[in-house]
Amino acid sequence: MAQGTKATVVAFQREQGFGRVEVEGQGELPFDAVVAQPAPEKLVPGTAVMVEIGPSRIPGKLKVVKLWIGDAPP
C-alpha cells in the first residue's frame, strides 16, 4: 500500500486543471487534477490532504502523483 505524506492545498485552478500543495519536508509541489481523488470544490487553500510523491517529467524534480483526503489512500 502506498505511504502518504501530509500536505496542505496552497492553490487549485480548476479551469486549468492543476494546483499546488505544501508538503511537509518538501516545500511546494504541483499536482494535476486527474491525480486528485476529492471533488474539485473540496480542493480549497488550507485543506489538509495526503499525497504520494513521484518523479516529474522535469529531470530532478518531484510532483504529486496521488492526492486524497483522509488517512488511507483510495
Image: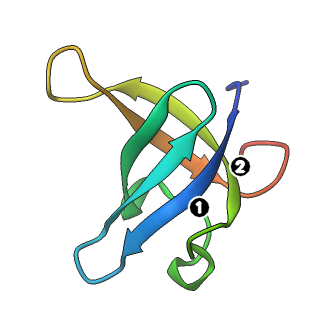
Q: Could you tell me residue 5's position as x and y percent?
A: 68, 32
- Relative to 30, 39 lies left or right: right
Q: Up-down: is 41 above or below 61?
A: below
Q: Residue at x 63, y 32 (%)?
A: 24
Task: Give the residue at x 58% y 77%.
Answer: 39
Task: Give the class, few, some or many, for how many residues have Cα within 10 Å of label 2's Cα (few <14, many ≥20).
Answer: few
Tell me where residue 11 sits by quadrant. Answer: bottom left
> Who's the residue at 38% across and 51% down the image?
31
Badges 2 and 1: C-beta atoms under 8 Å apart? yes
| Numbered badge on residue 54 | none
Give neighbour class at mark 1: few <14, some 14-19, many 20+ (Cα, 10 Å).
some
Name the residue that disc number 2 marks.
74
Does residue 42 lie above or below 48 as drawn? below
Q: Residue at x 66, y 54 (%)?
A: 68
What secondary structure is found at the residue carrying circle 1? loop
Point out residue 42 in the picture as x, y percentages from the top left corner: 63, 78
Q: Nearer the viewer, residue 3 or 30?
A: 30
